[in-house]
Image (cartoon, helix red, strand yellow):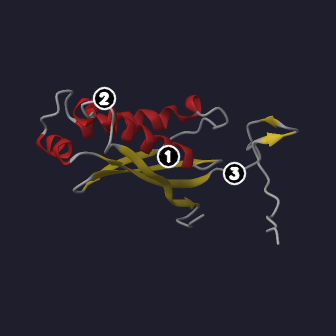
Amino acid sequence: MAQVYPVVEFTHISDSRAQMVDITAKGDVTREATAKGRIYLRKETLLAIQEGTVIKGNVLATARIAATLAVKDTPRIIPMCHQIPVGAIEVEFMEEDSWIEATVRVRTVGKTGVEMEALTGVSVALLTIWDMVKSAEKDENGQYPVTRIDAICVTEKKKGAGDRQ
């Protein structure tokens, strides 16, 4: 028996055309979104990051700046995102034996959420890490057998006075 799925409404599509959702009637409320993701690297590369011996410089400081810029540029990068005032950006990194996890939290007071901003920040932070260490990650054939970015997701969304959305 075939499974029946509910009809899904795509708010960014109308009459088969992409559109920006009209949020003008919505009120401004406090909004927050947190996203995270991981980059898997060779142990030697992770040690070089921890010891600060990467040739291109301080990897995590650069990734933090890149994430911040990406959050602020999200409406320019993703066509249907609204330009909203970003009130705060927090970028954190957690390092383990085989990976670094980036977490980006974005806050605003506005008419729409900041999930895309948080996801963009995490993505660019992880891509920046990859870019800064790619020479150490390549094998003898110029491939990346260990390096991968994984598990990028929204971990929390809040709307209003601390309410989860």
Q: State the CA–CA distance, disc 2 to disc 3.
A: 52 Å
| View extreme (bottom): residue | 1
Q: Earlier in the sequence, mark 2 or mark 3?
A: 3
Residue at the spot 35% in from the left edge and 34% down from the top edge: 128
Secondary structure category for the residue under label 3 = loop
CB under 8 Å between callouts 3 and 1? Answer: no
Residue at the spot 31% in from the left edge and 45% down from the top edge: 146
Q: State the CA–CA distance, disc 3 to disc 1.
A: 24 Å
Q: Quick one: label 3, few (<14), some, or many (20+) residues within 10 Å?
A: few
Residue 126: horizontal and vertical position, in percent?
Answer: 37, 41
Marker disc for residue 27: 3
Q: Earlier in the sequence, mark 3 or mark 1?
A: 3
Q: Quick one: label 2, few (<14), some, or many (20+) residues within 10 Å?
A: few
Secondary structure category for the residue under label 2 = loop
Would residue 155 appear left or right of 125 to someone viewing this image?
A: right
Would residue 75 appear left or right of 46 to someone viewing this image?
A: right
Marker disc for residue 119: 1
Residue at the spot 12% in from the left edge and 35% down from the top edge: 53
Reading the image, the residue beneath label 2 is 142
At label 1, the amino acid type is: Leu
